[in-house]
Image: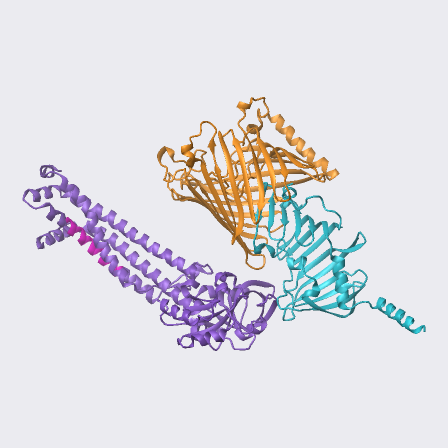
Chain colours: A cyan, B purple, C orange
Amino acid sequence: MIRPALAAALLLAAAAAFPQSAEEIVRRLEANQRFRTQEAEGSLVITDRFGSRTKTFLSYAEGQERMLLAFTNVEEKGQKILRLRDEIYLYFPEAEEVVRLQGAALKESVMGSDFSYEDLTGEKSLLDLYEVKLSGRELLAGREQFLLELKARARGVAYPAQKLWVDVEEYLPRRAEYYALSGRLLKTLEVLEVRRVGGRSVMSRAIMRDAMKKSSSTEFRVQRVKLDEPLPKNIFSLEALSW
Amino acid sequence: MKFLLSLAWKNLSRYRRRTTITAVALAVGVAVFIWMDGWLLGAELESRRNIIWYEAGAAKVLNQEYLEQIQNLPLKQVVEDAAGVERALASLGLEATRRAVFSGELFLGEGSLFVKAVALDPATDGRVFRLQETVRQGRFLQTGEPETLLGEWLARDLGAAVGDWVTVRARSRFGAFQTLDLQIVGILNCPNPVINQGTIFLPLDLADQALELEGAVSEIALAFPEWQEPEARLGQIRRALAGFPELAVADWQELARDFLAIAEGKRAGTGMLLLLIFIIAAVGISNTMLMAVYERVREIGMMRALGMRDLSIRLAFLLEAGGIGLIGSALGLVLGAALNWYMVRWGLDLSAFIGDMQVGYRVHSVFRSAWHPQALVGAVVFGVLASMLISFIPSSRALRKRITDCLRHV
Amino acid sequence: MKPAALVLLAALALLAAFTLPAAAEVGSSVTLSGYATLARLGEEAAVSALLKSRLDLQSRGNDNVRGQLQLDGWVGEEAALDVPRAWLRVRLPWLRLTMGKTRLSWGDGFVFNAGDVLFGSLDPLAGDLSAAALRDQTAWLLSAYLPLGAFSFLEAAALPYGVPAGPGLADDLAGLLAPRTFAQLAGGAGLRGVFKAGGLKLESGWYADWAAKAHKPYLGLQGHLLADWNLSAVLAIPIDDPQWADAGQWLAVTSGLFHLSRLGGDRSLSLRLEGALRPGARWSEASGAEALAAADPGAPLYGLLLFPEAALALSATLSLQARALLSPVDGSGLALLGAAWSPYQGLTLSAYASAMAGDGNDLYAWDYGGPALTLGAEFVF
């Protein structure tokens, strides 16, 4: 009479020890990275064959569609970008001018970096775009990782294949590799630093490299971040843009 | 009349020095005009040829949406059923070949450049284009092989040689990133600088597979002999393609608008040259005739006193000016024709000056002229008429004076 | 202003720059730039140089009060000091107030902007086409900004002393605050509203300009159709005894098109075309005494002026630019070709060539602005 209960308990224990299908891992990974609002202070270090330049910024984001970015490095100090669903407002402090732009061309690269908006704001879940397979566990910088292999479900996906290393404890990506149709490595993302914010783990330093251009990379650093805390009132407005 | 002619001739030979100088000035003007006009015409004809032979064919069948954003080379807008299009056009007896065109980044060693990539069918490309004849090193493409051809200037910029492997990074038809490893099998020296500088070629079947084209192509290029006046042909083609409402037909002129803008400018340039000749003729001849008239005011008075009519006197001056015009123009014709002959026969090598500079004309750095008979005749006629017209003013002045004033003139 | 006052001002600025950062409440930056120009002087070539410096101090850290002080000094044909900006901004629960010397940009348009009733962006713009912002004039002002939702607002502004004629500290500040009667104030006051309806931005306002003795109501539209476009119209109605039969003389219309296309990688091409149309202005060439170069304030108001621009960014650090101001009525123009390269962060090296093409009587006359070549370097830190 005890047996079925024992079996159930054993099953539960097994599920706790090996809880994960690949899909489950991706879901937890995405839940971990999903935020309603984000307020961050950080910098981008863009390196190309001429050298590197650093842009520092303050950013406020709500969901995927509303973002205010204010540059704080001296060269672009005071310039702000308000990005909305189908329009962009730019603020130039010298001319004290707000310029409104629309059109598809603006949606492509982030401040001339190796990050594309596809990289930053994948609106869809990875599971919508890719078939995911758990191909094992690996150690990366002394921490255990799930190694996931992603294959695109449809043909329009920019990177037909990806490899993703997900930290077993934190459910954060530690490394990602992006491949072309031919199987050639195009870009790598390496997470260099993770920070605990309000009980969650967040990437605070990551570097994206163009695998075909040795000298080109974009490093992303977050000095301060707040997640799911109320943003300043009316931050996505012309008033805040021209403040 | 005969008298007037001989009078004009006598006057011409009486002031030989002045006649010579004026005629030479005019001759230089006419010669420069003939030379420049021949040169520009040569460049235009060669450009046209180079556009048709290496770039546009006589016309292309393309997706309407592709044509609207052709500068971006979008691989999303394609001719889906290339075989169907070719079947529909079969009855017209045109030569046709398929091409897929896309933009990509070309990597060699540490360097990279954005290029236009043209995937062509090595078996049929020669029916429309003459690329094969421009291979300077190595050989032309072969179907099914991971090979590429590069223009000479592009190869030089990248430091590439036959045998090197390059990688092209591009987006597939559906938007996925793709890389193609290709071996350089040949280097082109195409007279069309656009090709030489920023275009690479690869076999179509290879691109078809790599870029998920599934038989679709960017364009079907056509060749037909009446490309100079393509309208009737284009009408035929459009009717034959009635079953493909998404497709458009564009002739080479539409496909090479930048060149045509230059040709427009050229026409304006010819106009400027004519004006210049007119000014040379006007200044030289009016000066000469002014001198002639002033020197001969007493003579004119005498002739008028003896009963010669104003019209005849005017005619005499007109003929005298026409004589200078004729001598100058004829001299200019000979000089211009000689220059033009040299330019047609040998051309002028400007490679040292031009190098990689793009001037819009699709000509190589050796500029060659062409013969333009209308311009030869026109320049002479214009030279003579302009000279005669100009002489009108000073002679009118003299004839407005009273005979007595003329006779008292010092 | 006395030299002693200048020294005091500079000392205060230095004090602010070097003592306050300890509290991390001031963001400071310095811009140094130098330019050498080869141009025509009479019949000969001449070299000239210009050195500029800018000290910029901005408050940081308070979300409800902001301030900025900018000091410019330059040595060129003459040496001068200026305070282009000195302002304070306060956020109140439902209103924002700005006071001090700064700029307000009303309307839309890079060079030609009929909606810019405060500073005026209709004049033919004579000199340097190389700047990033071609219109950045500032004035002493007081303004209130009232948000009406996220993308609509009302803004009221008063410029009690009008727009300063040009930079130069002494001219600007001397006697500025001396008591004046209202009749003596040569400034203006106005109100504008900005609204969003569908994909369109709609802006309308009114400025009573006592300096120009005119009421200036304006209307502006901005949207996107293949390219970003804007269209504005302004009427300058004389305050004293307007002759309504001449209403056509008062109208000015400006319009602009802007398109940005990515060319792959970091490369992009942006194209802009702007025009200013004044139906009541001159549509035939001015000559003789009426003819003045664009640099003179009394230059003839031609019915049409155009500003085409193409900018090609070849990488994140290298860009090429071609700009022109064209006056089709008298067939003259001013053109600039330039290149800028930023090899290191903060450092920009530039080279540009400019020339005017036009007869001696034209707005852009060859005699006035013959060909010039300028090399420049700018460093921000």
The quadrant the C terminus of chain A occupies is: top right
* Chief SS of the magenta region: helix
Quadrant of the rendered image containing residue C191: top right
C23 lies above or below B22: above
Is residue C345 in view from this perspective? Answer: no
B112 lies above or below C161: below
How many labels were placed on the picture? 0
- Percent across and percent down for residue B184 are 54, 72
Q: Residue furthest front?
A: A1
Quadrant of the rendered image containing residue C261: bottom right
Judge whether residue B218 is colored magenta: no
- Percent across and percent down for residue C160 are 57, 28
Q: Residue furthest right?
A: A1
Judge whether residue B323 is colored magenta: yes
- Percent across and percent down for residue B342 are 32, 64
- Percent across and percent down for residue C331 are 38, 44
B295 vs C238, left or right, is left
Q: Which residues are magenta?
A: B317-335
